[in-house]
Image (spheres, rainbow, N blue to C red):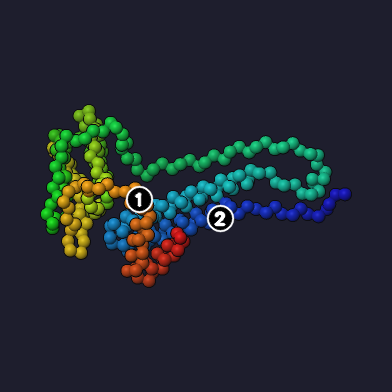
Amino acid sequence: MINDEPAAPVPSNGGDDAAESRSEERLRDADEIEKAMESVTRDSARLHLQQLVTKLRKEGQALKRVAASASAAAASSPASPSVGEKAEEAPAAKPAPLPPVADPPKRAPASVQPPRTAKYQSFPTYQVDLGGYSSPTISIYIPLNGIGKHDKSKITCDLKSTSFDLVVTDFEGKSYRLLNDNLEKDIDAAKSKYVVKPNKIIIKLGKVKGEYGYDSWTQLTAKKKKTKEEKSDPSAGIMDLMKDMYDSGDDNMRKMIGETMYKQK
């Protein structure tokens, strides 16, 4: 006997909705932090917050791709027949397996850095001036005859709070690199720069100013190499920074940071 009752609805899989919701949460967190950055005056604090915004956006985009893939797979699955239709239909052959869902194309990086390969060699020589106790900068002089006439797009210097990386490519048939990722102390990247002179390059590393003046350096490179644990968990430093900002901020800042830290936990 054919059953005339309507077929029960097939429960939907809410995994893609959950992924979409988590994606929107992270993207909204990133937008809120970017708005709050307008009131942050310390360059190092802005740098840490920008790293957190980048992390949240990456997670949000990844979750959005998961939701898109789940939706595409659900749309391509055949609808389940009703009970009456099953009674009338002859046994059907097993459906062919669905083709794999292709991953969305990866986005190109915002900026292309020169490749760090073995083709680079060390500069012939360089000198370091650590400056006095009250000096705001450390100066590094890299002599290179005729460098002032070289294509400026082939001279780059990546300055970060814990390192600098100077690269000169295709200069008189050679490419040079000077990298230091183990500085004795952190630097103020916002106050650091490099200048190309006719026959030399000068790197100015901005010292961090503390309560009693600028940091005193005894050498350019730290004697002890930083451990993997100190380098592998940047989020720990970001969370500490956000806690300090929460303690010293106004009510709006505390509300925004409190909600963000709660969601991250």
Q: Position of residue 4 (x, y in %)?
A: 83, 53
Residue labelled with disc 2:
18
| Furthest residue toward front | 224
**Vertical side of 209 occupied by 195: above or below:** above
Toward the top, the furthest residue is 173
In the displayed structure image, the side of residue 104 where residue 248 appears, left or right? left
Q: Secondary structure at mark 2?
A: helix
Front position in the image: 239 or 201: 239
Labelled disc at residue 229: 1
Whether residue 193 appears in this view of the structure is no
- Please give left or right for residue 143 compared with residue 162 in the image: left
Above or below residue 73? Residue 41 is below
* Rendering quarter of residue 111: top left
Residue at the (59%, 45%) spot, across then down = 72
| Percent coordinates x, y for residue 106 in the rendering | 46, 41
Question: Which residue is drawn at the image coordinates 24% and 44% (left, top)?
Answer: 180
Question: What's the CA distance linking mark 2 and mark 1?
Answer: 33 Å
Q: Earlier in the sequence, mark 2 or mark 1?
A: 2
